[in-house]
Amino acid sequence: MSIDEAGVRKALETIIDPQLGKGLITLGLVEQVAVAADGIRVVITSEESDPAANAPLERAITQAMETLAELEGVALPPLEVSFARKVRLAEQSSSSTENPLPNVRHVIAVGAGKGGVGKSTSAVTLAIGLARTGARVGLLDGDIYGPSIPTMFGLDEEVINVRGTTMIPFEAFGVKTVSIGKLVDPDKALIWRGPMAHGAFKQLALQTDWGPLDYLLVDLPPGTGDVPLTLAQLLPLTGAVLVCTPQRVAQDDARRAARMFQQLEVEIIGVIENMSSFTGKDGTTYDIFGEGGAEILAQTMGLPFLGRLPIHPELRINLDAGTPDRCFSGDPLLAEALDGLANGLASRVALMEQAGGLDRPTLEIN
Ligand code: ADP
């Protein structure tokens, strides 16, 4: 028995990141593995500038290699573990030759720490709000475990059109959209795991005829699963919007999601607080889930705050009925909040672009 490169990689994959629940190889953190006569060399990418911060990971790698040697029944050869400065995941695929969607100016993920906080509601209303500013907008429903865009867009009865191997997106309310719910039976999606989720998401993102877009919003599944990882590796992301309700339990999950994006080197463009208060017909405001919790979360994590969305029956009614555009023409307070969030997002993205923080390909008009 002996130690080879495949064995070393397998052992490295057993080292699980506690935040993301994934191994070092899956997370793309292993830059190099070399097994030669004079020993084993492992290079890990790390964003830590203080070498002491890498010590726990180095110990875990040494332990994993000791276990491997024990299993192989050999003495552990000299082991060299080194840490290289982290390369941005987003930049890895952002050069125009590698960018698989060169006609899309900004890909923006919409994520949440847990389900039911209004992530899809935010994605849909942000998409329509951005379209109302005159932008060309796409919305990719990547929530493989609970795709709700077909219902929210009133597309439940529609069938996806395919030209060759390319999907033609639906167009409604000025937004082009496709949903995983139109490719597979959502009941079956529940049992999907890594590779299948990866494949379906990739197909949806890359085999859709989006045409030129200013923004492609991606409604992610809640939590820290495989889809965000796939997305970060697949497309150059401008950043992510994080949706959170004000309660403490939601904040804890949102914090985990925020750390996941940070670990994937995806910039958080801003936090939205949804369901922050309810104002009755008599004008009395009720703090049903509390107010301000998500803003505090944003402050403590040093993240921009995009604004609040109140609990409003028009949102639930119109999104259930597939008429989301009506939220912009009913109660002016709701319309104002929705337009404000979309405008705030557009301004933040423009600022990021001006600050030169985005190494994005320029838009090609066909
Ligand atoms: P998620 O995508 O986070 O699972 P959804 O966007 O599907 O959550 O929202 C869950 C439900 O709550 C939907 O029925 C939606 O219409 C409703 N909802 C979300 N936000 C609000 C709000 N601010 N006011 C009223 N209903 C809301």
Image (spheres, helix red, strand yellow):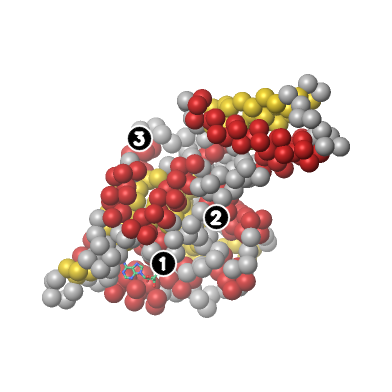
- Between 229 and 40, the residue placed more toward the observer is 40
Residue 118 lies left or right of residue 41; in this view the side is left
**Left or right relative to 217: residue 272:** left
In the image, the residue with mark 1 has its CB under 8 Å from the nearest atom of ligand 1: yes
Confirm whether residue 152 shows in the render: yes
Q: Is residue 217 visible?
A: no
Neighbour tally class for label 2: few under 14, some 14-19, many 20 plus, Cα within 10 Å? some
Q: Give neighbour class at mark 3: few <14, some 14-19, many 20+ (Cα, 10 Å).
A: few
- How far across and down, in percent of the image, does residue 263 sit? 49, 41
- At label 2, the amino acid type is Gly
Q: Whole-percent x and y of residue 313?
A: 29, 74
**Marks 3 and 2 close (CB-CB < 8 Å):** no
To which residue does mark 2 refer?
225
Q: In this rendering, which labeled residue sits more in front, label 3 or label 2?
A: 2
Residue 268 picture location, percent across and down: 40, 45
Disc 2, SS: loop
State which tag comes first along the sequence, 2 or 1: 1
Disc 2 and disc 1 in contact, CB within 8 angstroms: no
What's the residue type where badge 1 is placed? Gly
- Position above or below: 12 against 226: above
Query: Quarter of the image containing the N terminus?
Result: top right
Q: Which residue is mark 1?
A: 116
Please name the amino acid that badge 3 sits on: Gln
Q: Residue at x 62, y 71 (%)?
A: 188
The disc at residue 354 is 3
Q: Which mark is residue 173?
A: none
From what the image shows, is residue 227 above or below residue 52? below
**In 3D space, how far apart are the residues under numbered discs 3 and 2 (Cα atoms)?**
32 Å
